Structure formats: C-alpha cells, structure tokens
Amino acid sequence: MKKGSSTPCPLRCPHLGCQLSWNPGEKSWDCPCHGSRFDYDGNLLSGPAQIPASGSSADTIDG
Ligand code: FES
C-alpha cells in the first residue's frame, strides 16, 4: 500500500484560525500566518499556538 498520497482534512490553526499547509518535507502542518507547526495528527510542535490543531473541536478555541 502506498503511503503519502493523502493527508488529513485541511486544518485551521488554533492561534488565529489561518489555514494550515501540509509540508511534505518536514511532514508537518505549517501555519503561514505566524509560523506555528503541528505534526501529522495536529499535535503542537511549535507556537505561537498553544493548543493542538485537532481539527474536530474548533468551537473550544475562543473562550
Ligand atoms: S494563526 Fe497560525 S500561528 Fe497565528
């Protein structure tokens, strides 16, 4: 089975909501706005975001 031809649904950055871009070289989701990075599963690699980009619970960001 071939891997790498599909990626998860596009994720929103939990920082300010920019659309993340998949970085095939680093295998990470990178935010073009302020540089937050997330792994394949949306776990936070580097900020300024402070929570994971899990993609399924976006309604808990703004409190
Ligand atoms: S919106 Fe993604 S780092 Fe700010």
Image (cartoon, rainbow, N blue to C red):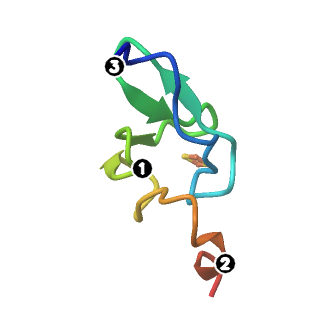
Q: Which residue is mark 1?
A: 42
- 2 or 1: tag closer to the N-terminus: 1
What residue is rendered at 53% in x and 39% in y?
A: 8
Amino acid type, mark 2: Asp
Residue position marked by numbered label 3 in the rendering? 26
Q: Is residue 55 above or below residue 11?
A: below
Answer above or below: position of 13 versus 23: below
Percent coordinates x, y for residue 16 in the rendering? 66, 57
Q: Secondary structure at mark 2?
A: helix
Say which residue appears at 42% left-offset and 17% top-offset. 4
Q: Position of residue 1 (x, y in %)?
A: 34, 16
Q: Mark 3 or mark 2, which is nearer the start of the sequence?
A: 3
Q: Is residue 58 left or right of residue 24?
A: right
Label 3 secondary element: loop
Closest to the observer, 7 or 11: 7
Structural distance between the alpha carbons of marks 2 and 3: 28 Å
Q: Are marks 2 and 3 in contact (CB under 8 Å)?
A: no
